Amino acid sequence: MHRSASAVALVAAVLVLAGCSAVAPTTPTPTAVGGDAAGEAIPDGADTQRATVTRVVDGDTIEVRAGGETDTVRLVGVDAPEARGETNPAEFEGVPDTAAGRACLARAADNATAALADLVADRDVTLAVDPLTDRRDRYDRLLAHVVVDGTNANHRLVETGRARVYDTEFALADRFYASERAAQDQRRGLWSCADQPTGDTDLQLRVRADAPGDDRENPNGEYVALVAGDDAVDVGGWTVSDEAGREFTFPEGTTVPANGSVRLYSGFGEDTATEFYWHEGAVWNNDGDTAFVRDADGDLVLEHSY
């Protein structure tokens, strides 16, 4: 087929340009990344940069290398229990300021560090400085969202109960707080520390009567918890009952672990060693009721009215 000289020149020019593009592609400007469970991983207007995580310091701090320089990054909007030194339980809503509560938070600190390491250790990440926060804190650490494969690691820590929301203004705060409330309701991660003993008794009874939403549609949102101190307690054959006479019996061999808890949910599910299901639907009256715990001989051990 005959081609004109101008047509040949045009084709050659296109091929040259295409070849140059393949050798030296331009770097796209990072934008909001989808795939995060609560919405955008990177807030609009964030200043972003790529970096490689070189060390996970603890549950909310990492070290990175970017552009040949090293830097320390404090994950913005979150606060994990302290990995070095004792965590103040007052900073974590519902966790009792007791030896058991503090010990539980110490374990939660190790879990937060491990969870963050699983997400970002030795990974290439995007650092996004939130448009509503300072760029650096008083220790000169970069304050940033850490995003890996479309997941905002800061948010994931909150969502899984590895960290609380740090009370400050930042662009994704509404999403973070919603995820924190869900983690608290489900006692995920550190929020299970709220079931630690509040006093010196060997066993305590807690009642959560009002489930989120309609109790009839969310019966597992209400529960009772038996909470042990420093010694495990065998509760096999013990019963839990309400004022109406509905009764649940714990299977033989059920043990409340030392500094731990056993929960009895009102709804339906598969029993585990520390979680049981009454299969009754909603049990506890929101406007007042009494929970009774009796041992295998029928003797009253604990009673809680609300």
Image (cartoon, rainbow, N blue to C red):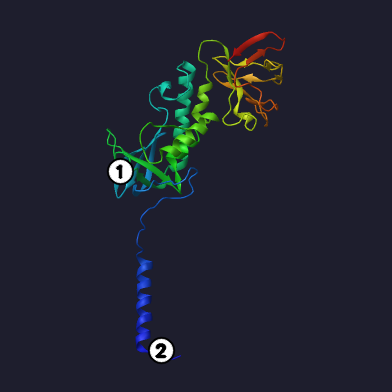
Question: Which residue is found at the position 34% from the left and 62% from the top?
Answer: 26
Q: Is residue 182 left or right of residue 124?
A: right
| Camera-side residue of 239 and 25 | 239
Mark drawn on residue 36: none
Identified by mark 1, the residue type is Thr
Residue 13 image offset from top left, x and y in percent: 34, 78
Q: How many marks?
A: 2
Residue at the spot of label 2? 3
Q: Nearer the viewer, residue 118 or 162?
A: 162
**Crowdedness of circle 1 by 10 Å Cα count: few (<14), some, many (20+)?**
some
Residue at left offset 62%, top offset 11%: 302
123 lies above or below 289: below
Q: Position of residue 205 (x, y in %)?
A: 59, 16
Most extreme residue toward the top is 299
For the residue labelled by badge 2, is the local secondary structure a helix, a strand or a loop?
Answer: loop
Judge the density around disc 2: few (<14), some (14-19), many (≥20) Cα neighbours within 10 Å. Answer: few
Please, is residue 22 above or below residue 291 in the view? below
Choose top left, top right, bottom left or bottom right for residue 87.
top left
Examine the rendering and report whether any part of residue 116 can be seen. Answer: no
Q: Amino acid at mark 2?
A: Arg
Q: Can residue 175 be seen in this snapshot?
A: yes
Q: Residue at x 46, y 30 (%)?
A: 110
Q: Where's residue 183, x and y in %?
A: 51, 32
Residue for point 35% across, 41% down: 144
Name of the residue lying farthest toward the bottom: 2
Q: Looking at the picture, how far across and down is residue 115, in whole percent?
A: 47, 36
Q: Quadrant of the C terminus?
A: top right
Residue under label 1, please give it.
Answer: 70
Of callouts 2 and 1, the N-terminal one: 2
Label 2 to label 1: alpha-carbon separation: 57 Å
